[in-house]
Amino acid sequence: MGRVMGIDMGSVRVGLAISDESGILASGHGHLIFKGYEDLIQGLIQIARRESVMEFVIGLPLNMNGSHGPQAAKAEKLAGMLRHKSGLPVTLSDERLSTVEATRLLHAGGKKATRGIVDAAAATVILQAFLDGQKKG
């Protein structure tokens, strides 16, 4: 399968997670500061090359009723640009409540939920849900 990178697009920070080689387990991989799409894409591609990433999964923050808001439009724009610039597959994955789940998991594990850690944990939740879906599918 190859390694997959999960991306949680925030307005300030972009959380990252990367799977293991077998595509079974997602692990947090820190975050990047969002200064614009070009800088972000360049950073994502650099990390992808260094970590042998073969695919990207970007969290799509839909509203609870399933509609698309401004954050979903940002994720969709990133997906299109990243697909074009990297030449790698990019999947958008419903991420409703991923940040809530990430915060809950961090607290359950006794970790302080600082912003950067929550961003990486949310990317991990998004990526793990995608990987689990791939196993079932």
Image (cartoon, rainbow, N blue to C red):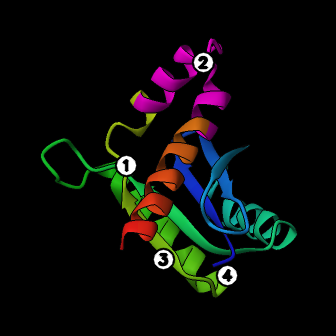
- Please, what is the three-letter code of the amino acid marked with disc 2? Gly
Query: What residue does disc 1 label?
Result: 95
Residue 24 falls in which quadrant of the image?
bottom right
Q: Nearer the viewer, mark 1 or mark 3?
A: 1
Query: What residue does disc 2 label?
Result: 109
Q: CA distance from mark 1 to mark 3?
A: 18 Å
Mark 4 and mark 2 in contact (Cβ < 8 Å)?
no
Q: Residue 80 shows which numbered tag?
A: 3
* Outermost residue, front side: 136
In terms of secondary structure, where does tag 2 sit?
loop
Residue at x-position 54% and y-position 15%: 107
Q: CA distance from mark 1 to mark 2?
A: 21 Å
86 relative to 78 in the view: left or right: right
> Is the residue 124 above or below the residue 137 in the image?
above
Q: Find residue 100 and report its horizontal and vertical position in percent.
A: 40, 28
Q: Residues within 10 Å of mark 2 (few under 14, many from 20)?
A: few
Query: What residue does disc 4 label?
Result: 86
Residue at x-position 52% and y-position 39%: 122
Q: Nearer the viewer, mark 1 or mark 4?
A: 1
